[in-house]
Image (cartoon, grey):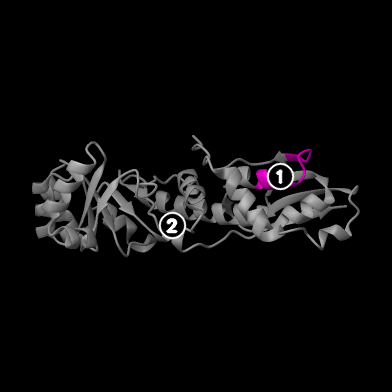
Amino acid sequence: MTPELPTDLVQQVARALAEDVGPGDLTAALVPAERHARAAIVTREPCVLCGSAWAEAVFRALDPALRIAWRARDGEALAAGATLCELEGQARALLTGERTALNFLQTLSGTATTVQSFVEALRGTGCRILDTRKTIPGLRAAQKYAVAVGGGSNHRLGLYDAILIKENHVAAAGSIAAAVAAARQRSPGVKLEVEVESLAELDQALTAGAEMVLLDEFSLPDMREAVRRCGGRLALEASGGVDLATLRDVAETGVDFVSVGALTKHLRAIDLSLRFSS
């Protein structure tokens, strides 16, 4: 099931076009305004498609009458050389929107493709992959959408929809117990997670009444011990230095989630191309 699109998608596209086009595309203006053209967007490498709504919004902002026929849907795995979509409309609009549309498509498809590889590595473990807040400024909602398209799960969207007490919060509050108590008092009913860096801190979080615990940079033996101590009473999330090579070992300790900042932080854009047809 494809996740819901971000509510600020139109604004994201408008900002992206504004920074690229500015007061006008000086090069596209060399083409007669009445000229129409056909084009296709293809991928030069295997990928999971993501970002079609952004690309379509880019071209429709420039030419509302433009026709676009998608040959694949978000979440679909494509082979190298596959056609993503075919377009027909004002030549100027196609030229002006090309880079902005491809920027969205290659970035979001890159995220979805990476996430799918992590999801596949977890298959059969019962553990789920989570994203983080380590996103491109201004594109968090878009990247969170791409994570979901790739089969991953979204952690909190921001600082406003869940509480994650980290080491600096503990230091400022005085203790894990004090931080948890303050969170309960100020934001009752809001999901509460505590980050711990040792088994001793895990015990403190359990005593304080955390609903979920993030195990930061735990060794595999300590993760297994944390799972044993929790006994299924609450969800455990492992984080810190996890990559595809170590992911399955971490999952097999019995933790419920693994969060990986690299899903949205270490981007590798997919190689896409828009080609005009004669």
Residue type for callout 1: Ala
Residue at position x 49%, y 51% in the image: 143
Q: How many labels were placed on the picture? A: 2
On the rendered structure, is 261 left or right of 39?
left
Kind of element beneath mark 1: helix
Q: Which mark is residue 143?
A: none
Horizontal and vertical percent for residue 131?
A: 39, 52
Q: CA distance from mark 1 to mark 2?
A: 30 Å
| Magenta-highlighted residues | 55-68
| Residue 172 rendering spot, x and y as whole percentages | 19, 61
Residue sitting nearer the eye, 30 or 220: 30
- According to the picture, the residue beneath numbered tag 1 turns out to be 61
Residue designated by label 2:
263
Q: 101 or 111: which is nearer to us?
A: 101
Viewer can see residue 80: no
Q: Quadrant of residue 261?
A: bottom left
217 to 204, vertically: above or below: below
The answer to which of marks 1 and 2 sits earlier in the sequence is 1
Residue 175: x percent and y percent? 12, 58
- Name the residue located 21 percent from the left edge and 43 percent from the top edge: 186
Between tags 1 and 2, which lies in front? 1
Q: Amino acid at mark 2?
A: Leu
Determine if residue 53 is in view: yes
The image position of residue 153, as x and y in percent, is 39, 45
